[in-house]
C-alpha cells in the first residue's frame, strides 16, 4: 500500500502542469534587460574593452623585472691577483638582476593606442545599447504576438459557438422538413472551418509563448496581460531623423569606429619617429669578476632607416580602413533615415488599416444581424448566413490584429530612431 501511494504521488507531481507566470509588458521588458543572454554578452564586451584600455595604459608605465639564474660549473676557475684569489668562475654560481625599463618617447603611438581603446569602449557601449534596443523590440513584439493570439483564441471560440448553434438549428430544421441536407452539410463545414481557425490560433499562441520564454529566459508558462501603454506622439520624419543622428547607437558606433581608424593611420605614421628608452639595472652575482655587484643606467635610441616598405604598407592599409569606416558611417546615416521613413509610413498604414477594420466590423455585424433575422424566418439561405458569418469572423480577426499591429508599428518607429529603450521605460509610461 505504501509503495502504491508513493507511485501515485510521483505520478501526480509529474502530471501536474507547471506553474504559470503572469507577466505584464513592463515586467517582461525589465526582465529581458536583466536576464537575456544576448545583453549579458554585450555587457561582457564592454568590460573586456575597459580591460583592454588598462592594458594599453601599461605600455607607457615603467616595467620592473627580476631575473635570477643559478649555474653548477664543471670546475672552479680563479686567479691570483696581488696575493688574493679572485673567483672568475665559481663551481656553484648564481646571479640576480633587477631591471627597470621606461619608454621616454615612442612617437606618440602609445598615447594614440590609449585613445583608441577609449573609443573602443564607446563602440562596445553603443553595441550594448543597440543590443538592448533589439531585444526590447523583439520582446515587445513577441509579447504582443502572445496577446494577439489570446485575443484571436477568444474570437475563434465565439465563431465556433456560433457555427455550432447554426449547425444544431439546421439539424432541427431538417427534422422539421424545412431545410435540406445541403443546409446541414454547409453548417457542418462552417463549424469545421471555425474549429480549424481555433486550432491555428492556439498554435500561434504556443509559438509566441515559446519565443517570449526565450526572450525572458523563463521555463514556466506565461500569461500575458493586454498592455495599456500610451507612447508619446510620434514626431515628424525630420525631427526623428535629427534626434536619431544625435543619439542612435549605430551612429555612435560608426562615428567611434571612424575615429579609431583615423587614429590608426596617425599611429602608423608615428613608426617613422625614433624610440627612446630608459634602462636601469642592478646586478648581484657570486663571481667577483669583474664585480659581484654593479649598477647601470642607460638610454637607448632606435631609428628606422630602411624597412623594405613595411611602414609605408601599414600606413596604406590603415588609410584604406579609414576610408571604409567613413563610407560605413555615411551608409549608416542614410540607412537610419530610410528606416525612419519606412517605419513612419508603416505606422500610418497600420493606423488606417485598423480604422478600416473597425468600420468593416461594424458593417459585418449589421449585415450578420440582418441576415440572421432573415435566416430564422427562412427568407435567407444557408449560403447567405454562411457568408455573413465568415465576413463577421474575418472582421473580428482584422480588428484584433490591427489593434496590436498599430502598437507594434509605433514601437518600430521609436526603434528606428534609436530611442525605444528610453521611450518604453520612461517613468511617464
Image: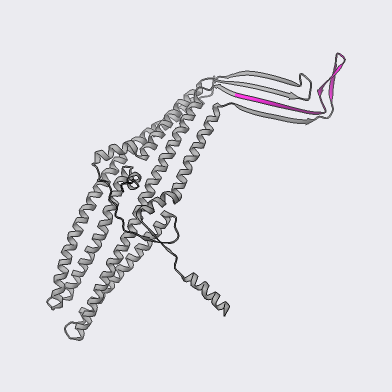
Q: What residue do we see at 69% from left, 19% from top?
A: 295
The vertical placement of 220 against 270, above or below, is: below
Q: Residue at x 25, y 56 (%)?
A: 403
Between 29 and 66, the one nearer to me in the picture: 29
Task: Classify residue 166 as left or right of residue 29.
Answer: left
Q: Position of residue 196 (x, y in %)?
A: 31, 70
Can you give x and y, in whole percent of width and height, for residue 331 in the image? 33, 37
Can residue 380 be spotted in the picture? no
- Residue drawn at x 35%, y 54% is 25
The outermost residue toward the right is 83
Residue 229 x %, y %: 29, 52
Q: Quadrant of residue 28?
A: bottom left
Q: Which secondary structure class fits the magenta region best?
A: strand
- Residue 91 lies within the magenta run: yes
- Describe residue 71's horizontal placement relative to residue 400 as left or right: right
The stretch of residues the image draws in magenta is 76-101
Q: Relative to residue 107, is residue 141 depicted above or below?
A: below
Quadrant of residue 387 within the rendered picture: bottom left
Amino acid at each position: 500500500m505504501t509503495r502504491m501511494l508513493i507511485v501515485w504521488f510521483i505520478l501526480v507531481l509529474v502530471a501536474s502542469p507547471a506553474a504559470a507566470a503572469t507577466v505584464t509588458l513592463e515586467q517582461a521588458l525589465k526582465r529581458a534587460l536583466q536576464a537575456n543572454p544576448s545583453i549579458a554578452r554585450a555587457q561582457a564586451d564592454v568590460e573586456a574593452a575597459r580591460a583592454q584600455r588598462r592594458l594599453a595604459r601599461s605600455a607607457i608605465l615603467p616595467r620592473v623585472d627580476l631575473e635570477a639564474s643559478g649555474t653548477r660549473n664543471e670546475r672552479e676557475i680563479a686567479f691570483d691577483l696581488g696575493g688574493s684569489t679572485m673567483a672568475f668562475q665559481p663551481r656553484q654560481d648564481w646571479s640576480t638582476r633587477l631591471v627597470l625599463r621606461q619608454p621616454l618617447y615612442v612617437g606618440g603611438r602609445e598615447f594614440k593606442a590609449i585613445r583608441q581603446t577609449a573609443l573602443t569602449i564607446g563602440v562596445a557601449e553603443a553595441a550594448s545599447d543597440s543590443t538592448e534596443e533589439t531585444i526590447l523590440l523583439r520582446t515587445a513584439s513577441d509579447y504582443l504576438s502572445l496577446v494577439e493570439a489570446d485575443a484571436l483564441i477568444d474570437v475563434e471560440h465565439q465563431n465556433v459557438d456560433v457555427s455550432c448553434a447554426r449547425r444544431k438549428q439546421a439539424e432541427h430544421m431538417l427534422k422539421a422538413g424545412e431545410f435540406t441536407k445541403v443546409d446541414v452539410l454547409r453548417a457542418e463545414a462552417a463549424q469545421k472551418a471555425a474549429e480549424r481557425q481555433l486550432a491555428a490560433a492556439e498554435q500561434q499562441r504556443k509559438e509566441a509563448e515559446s519565443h517570449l520564454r526565450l526572450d525572458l529566459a523563463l521555463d514556466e508558462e506565461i500569461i500575458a496581460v493586454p498592455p495599456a501603454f500610451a507612447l508619446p506622439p510620434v514626431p515628424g520624419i525630420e525631427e526623428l531623423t535629427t534626434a536619431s543622428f544625435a543619439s542612435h547607437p549605430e551612429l555612435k558606433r560608426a562615428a567611434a569606429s571612424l575615429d579609431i581608424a583615423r587614429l590608426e593611420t596617425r599611429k602608423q605614421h608615428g613608426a617613422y619617429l625614433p624610440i627612446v628608452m630608459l634602462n636601469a639595472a642592478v646586478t648581484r652575482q657570486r663571481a667577483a669578476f669583474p664585480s659581484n655587484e654593479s649598477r647601470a643606467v642607460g638610454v637607448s635610441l632606435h631609428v628606422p632607416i630602411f624597412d623594405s616598405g613595411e611602414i609605408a604598407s601599414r600606413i596604406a592599409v590603415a588609410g584604406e580602413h579609414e576610408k571604409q569606416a567613413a563610407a560605413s558611417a555615411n551608409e549608416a546615416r542614410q540607412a537610419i533615415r530610410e528606416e525612419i521613413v519606412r517605419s513612419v509610413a508603416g505606422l500610418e498604414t497600420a493606423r488606417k488599416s485598423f480604422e478600416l477594420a473597425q468600420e468593416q466590423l461594424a458593417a459585418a455585424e449589421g449585415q450578420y444581424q440582418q441576415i440572421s433575422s432573415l435566416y430564422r424566418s427562412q427568407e435567407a439561405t444557408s449560403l447567405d448566413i454562411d457568408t455573413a458569418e465568415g465576413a463577421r469572423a474575418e472582421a473580428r480577426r482584422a480588428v484584433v490584429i490591427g489593434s496590436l499591429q498599430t502598437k507594434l508599428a509605433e514601437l518600430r518607429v521609436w526603434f528606428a530612431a534609436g530611442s525605444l529603450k528610453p521611450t518604453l521605460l520612461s517613468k511617464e509610461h
